[in-house]
Image: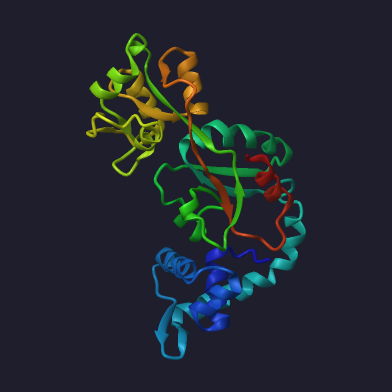
Amino acid sequence: MSLLGPQLDAFLAIVKHNTVNAAAEALFLTQTAVTQRIKTLETQLRTTLFTRTRRGMVLTQEGHALVLYCQSAKLLEGEVMAKIQGAGLETFVQIAISGPSSIMQSRVLKNLSPLIKKFPKLRFQFSFNDIELRHVALKEGRVDFAFLEKEDVAPEMKTKTLAPENYVLVASSQWSHRTLESILTEEPMIDFDPQDRMTLNYLKHYGLDQNTQHARHFANDTVALAKLASEGLGYTTLTEEFAKPYVDQKLLIILNKGQIFQHPLFLCWYDRPEPPTYFKAIIHAIN
């Protein structure tokens, strides 16, 4: 187990195996993932670590300096590992988790709260990210866990299939007297951005997409989606969990009652040879 982090692990793997391909095989990653980590490391250090030749990857002068740093750091690992065995209890540990705001608010914050008491020195960085680039952050080692859709899950990632997100169709409670047909034909949709097809997918799934307005409002924040819908500016889809407090406060109503659209989601991370207790506890807590 290396304490240097995924980017330096990728760097040392290339130094040892001479090519990106061989380094990727040794780390059980794709070549793209290894290349991304090296690019990120070079960007952070503002330097070039390798030059490509026919004989493989050759260290630059700056690359040689980084190797010396890594060698010195590894000499300290034996001393540090004794403390790491109690990580989260005896030493401060930072864990970064990236996911869509809906699941982060409705599941993650609630489920991980007890772990803060169990591991008093565990520190979380919660990244509310509704833009579908969470898999890149995970590959580059910028986060430890990410919630991904099926098409973004790479073969080398470890995954946990989560209970699907159940999406419901919602609109302002001001429209409670109106028919579903009148709302869908006369009012616009509200979605996250032009690539967001969740509301369209819901409507198509239930054969409700005929005669709907295809010009949409956009708001790249889930709370803003709920706010715009509650103000009567259009209708949208939200997860049941996220929509519930708005429905309970009579700000939103659920249209097409009893009909949900299931959206599968996966918790993803990269395997660790010796995952510490707190790491396994996080995986177990999120469902």
Which residue is found at the position 73% from the left and 61% from the top?
A: 81
Side (left or right) of 66 relative to 188: right
Which residue is found at the position 51% from the left and 55% from the top?
A: 153
Side (left or right) of 229 relative to 157: left
Foreground of the two, 215 or 11 = 215
Outermost residue toward the top in this view: 177
Which residue is found at the position 34% from the left and 29% from the top?
A: 208
Outermost residue toward the bottom in this view: 55
Q: Is residue 74 above or below residue 121?
A: below
Foreground of the two, 262 or 231 = 262
Side (left or right) of 258 relative to 184: right
Side (left or right) of 97 relative to 32: right
Residue 12 in view:
no
Report the quarter where the C terminus lies. top right
Q: Where is residue 215 in the image (x, y as percent from the top left)?
A: 22, 33
Q: In this view, does 131 lie above or below 210?
A: below
Residue 201 is drawn in which quadrant?
top left
Residue 217 is drawn in which quadrant?
top left
Q: Where is residue 280 in the image (x, y as percent from the top left)?
A: 70, 49
Report the quarter where the N terminus lies. bottom right
**Number of marks in the rendered image:** 0
Residue 233 in view:
yes
Foreground of the two, 98 or 194 = 194
Q: In this view, does 121 lie above or below 46?
A: above
